[in-house]
Image: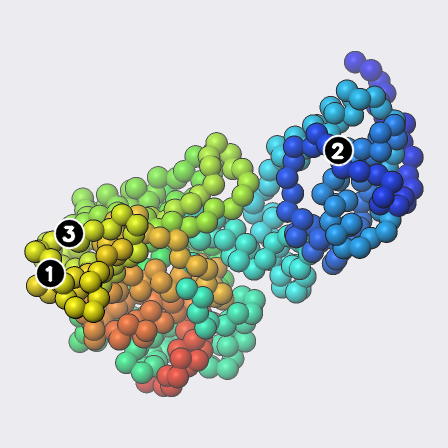
Amino acid sequence: MPSYVRTLNTTYEEVDVTTIKTHPANPRRGDLDVIKDSISVNGFYGSVVVNKRTSHILAGNHRYLAAKALGYDKVPVTWVDVGEHEEKRILTADNRTSELGGYDEAILVDLLKELSDEGMLEGTGYGADDLEDMIADLSGFEESDVDSSPTASIGIADELKGKWNTATGQVWRVGEHRLMCGDCRVSDDVAALVGDDRINVAFTSPPYASQRKYDESSGFKPIVPDEYVKWFCEVQNGVKRHLADDGSWFVNIKAHAEDGQRHLYVMDLVCAHVREWGWRFVDDLVWSRRGLPGTWQNRFKNQHEPIFHFAKSKGIKFYPDSVLSQSADAFAYKGKLKPSSTTNPISFSTSDVDYVIGQALPGNLLPVFESNKATHPAAFPVSLPTFFIKAYSDKGDVIFDPFMGSGTTAVAAQNEGRKALGMEISPSYLAVQLERLSEMGLTPELINEVT
């Protein structure tokens, strides 16, 4: 092996943009808008590599194009002196080595969170939605209708705690809804919140094993995968004890990957619901979501979230007609159809509901939901609980979320004329819930403090 490092004969200078040119054989495609944003914010902090013999750019073709689009007269250039074949080899190698690179996702998220907290995400190529998605991806929740939740950094939760003076043991009434700062694994806490009500739909995205810190001041500690089922037992007990016989229990959770494979604790959790705790396993549904570009060890990017549906009995409430969706392949599917209007020939009626050509019952593959702007690391989209609230409950019914987080399920319940009951262990996130509902015109009132 040689004891020296081979280097090309290089020189550096700023040159007029008209004297160099992109390589005609460059197969790489770049996002010029993102690159322009970066240059606008950060400046042109690296040179482009150009072959002195041909004036072809071998590395930095798209930074050069972005600079020209921004009106730059000159760009910094590193000149190399190579032949035609070596020129193409360097061009190919530069593209390929960039493509093969991956990320340590946790380090990247920490870096972006720090920049976000300092208001310096602009010019990085990442936005707030990207950061939210990556935080969710780390936990297996890829992690989406834009709503009116507070949009500042996660630190706003602590500020709101000061505003609302929230504390452990409090029960708040907000319109028809009740929210408690307590532990859904403690039967007395759940009983204090639920009272004489019966839950018609319980919907939640629980903490994911080992992945999220949440509000560390609340005393919550991440659960290791091997202990997750045991930890979750009291969660489902609280739901089952207060669930109506025709009610439904939905759990949105996806196991994270580690060392190139998925953990099995979610599969164990589903089996435990049926084999140990006596639930009926009605179905598993998935909702689609945008996946982050990039590569992960041994797997493709995550583009779906599972939701597991459990019930106590066969006779659950179920209103699929309330969640019809647009479909190019839709057709009327029951009853003898007849025109329901002489002025609208494409509208038809059966015995109990009107159907419009182009609408169909959804399957158990749900659509992509747009991202929330929420102050909680596991915030899910308002449209997600909305779908299940509409399909499995009536107006005025009780909707329970044992891990209410930033209050998304309560917002959905308010929108759909249902009564929300929410449990949340963190006083800071309870404050976020109060803020969101107050922004919807409701007045929070502290009604009890459980000691």
Residue 192 lies, with reference to residue 64, above or below; the image says: below
Q: Position of residue 198 (x, y in %)?
A: 17, 70
Residue lying at 77% horizontally and 44% vertically, measured from the top left: 64
Q: Amino acid at mark 3?
A: Tyr
Residue 310 lies, with reference to residue 451, above or below; the image says: above
Q: Earlier in the sequence, mark 3 or mark 2?
A: 2
Q: Which mark is residue 3?
A: none
2 or 1: mark nearer the eye: 1
Question: Which residue is labeled 1 in the image?
Answer: 338
Q: Would residue 451 be seen by someone viewing this image from the given angle?
A: no
Towards the viewer: 363 or 419: 363
Q: Amino acid at mark 1?
A: Lys
Q: Position of residue 328 (x, y in %)?
A: 30, 50
Q: Which mark is residue 333?
A: 3
Towards the viewer: 352 or 200: 352
Callout 3: few (<14), some (14-19), or many (20+) C-alpha neighbours within 10 Å? few
Q: Residue furthest top?
A: 1
Q: CA distance from mark 3 to mark 2?
A: 57 Å
Q: Would residue 59 be seen by someone viewing this image from the given angle?
A: yes
* Left or right of 385, for residue 315: left
Q: CA distance from mark 3 to mark 1?
A: 13 Å
Q: Earlier in the sequence, mark 2 or mark 1?
A: 2
